[in-house]
Image: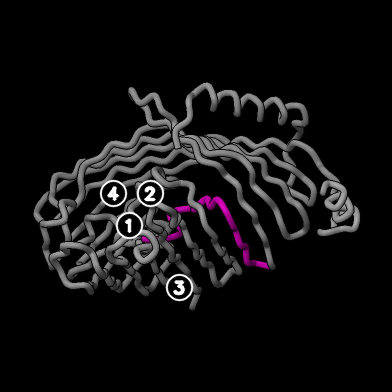
Amino acid sequence: MKFPKKFIAVVLVLVSVVSGAFAGDFLPLESGQIIWRNDFNFYSDNTEFFEPFRLRETILGQQVKTFLMAKTGGRTAVRIGLFADHRAARDTETRVQPIFSFIHQAGQLENVMGALLPVRRHGLIEPMQVTTLELTRPVEYGTQLILENGSLSADAFLNWQNLLAPGSRETFDYGGSARLLLFEGISLGVQAHGYHVGGVTYYFPGIIRNNIAGGVGLVLESRFPLLGSSSLEAYGMGSSDSNRPGYPGPGAGQGIYFKETFSPIKDWKIFGIAWRGWDFMSEEGDPNYNSIGYDGVYYKSDRNYEEIGIGYSASVDPGVVFDFELRSHWVEDAWAHSLRITATVPFDIEIKNIHQAPRRRDSKKELNKGDDDQ
């Protein structure tokens, strides 16, 4: 949705005026407390691909998530606010999306309904979801389950991209990731992602289309002399694609994914990725891992892809994080490069403590009021 800049400015000014009236020192969120949270993201991402699988792209702009975080009880909270994304250069339009979320915590399990704020693509690796989604789709809508209990971490989600309505087919994606600690430094990893286009029986003739991809692997983490903190991820992947019009390949595919990361110097990392695929297809994955080209016609069954890069990530001020990545890509016999620079700036303000009185639904007073209105 597009909004004029004046409208966005008025909304932000109103929020800041109301918040400033109650501003105080930041405190841990307690029952009845409201925090005004702001996350600014300044980003630049440039990819230079010339081979047939992925198009070159430049993404440059500024984003802000600004919302009120109110804890409504011992286990529940709500987020109310908006997300704004402005692409730089001559683009005068700003994309604005609402943030309305309900959060329920039950022990170490957290359920989010409404607007979702995914972290690192819900933990999905590059063949599952392309990394640029962190910039182009930082807000999703649906439901999410997050689990953290020390030995097991998991993130499962359902993201509605398009609702079923007159003139519109339903589209949603779903899946998640999980890691289970088996032994010290050794974890079992699980990846899954699905993409669905439906609604054909209600409003439209046509076909229902599904894409499913996933994998299981091991994650090894340790520390070595000179190499520093190191990790190795190895996954066996599989995919299934059905009813894609004009798809030139088979419906099922496989792949093997390896990623190694070293951190020999504080805040710096060196990483490499190796991929071998056979008819693999993931709807929202990095196209460099798929067998089909971006034109939907070119097809190569056996795929080879390698990537090596260097990254820097440091906190330049409390909470303020600067990230830099420079990558080289080998796509079959072609070479390409890419670059990403981001600066994330959080700004939180405690607004007010509110002491809530318990409220029963359908109380006699409310029922009587309804009768009087009739």
For residue 221, the mark is none
Camera-side mark, 4 or 2? 2
Marks 2 and 3, the one that precedes in the sequence:
2
Q: Residues within 10 Å of mark 3 (few under 14, many from 20)?
A: many
Given the current orientation, which residue lies at the most extreme bottom position?
Answer: 182
Camera-side mark, 2 or 3? 2
Q: Quadrant of residue 284?
A: bottom left
Marks 3 and 4, the one that precedes in the sequence:
3
Residue bearing mark 4? 309
Marks 4 and 1, the one that precedes in the sequence:
1
Identify which amino acid the numbered label 3 is placed on. Answer: Ser
Residue bearing mark 2? 133
Q: Are marks 2 and 3 in contact (CB under 8 Å)?
A: no
For residue 187, the mark is 3
Q: Quadrant of residue 286?
A: bottom left
Q: Position of residue 4 (x, y in %)?
A: 48, 25
Residue depicted at 20% across the width and 45% down the height: 55
Residue depicted at 71% across the width and 57% down the height: 76
Measure the alpha-carbon separation of dots 4 and 1: 22 Å
Measure the alpha-carbon separation of dots 1 and 2: 9 Å
Q: Quadrant of residue 350?
A: top right
- Horizontally, is 20 left or right of 275 in the view? right
Q: Are marks 1 and 2 in contact (CB under 8 Å)?
A: yes
Camera-side mark, 4 or 1? 1
First to last magenta residue range? 107-125
Measure the alpha-carbon separation of dots 3 and 4: 24 Å
Q: Are marks 1 and 3 in contact (CB under 8 Å)?
A: no
Residue depicted at 51% across the width and 53% down the height: 141
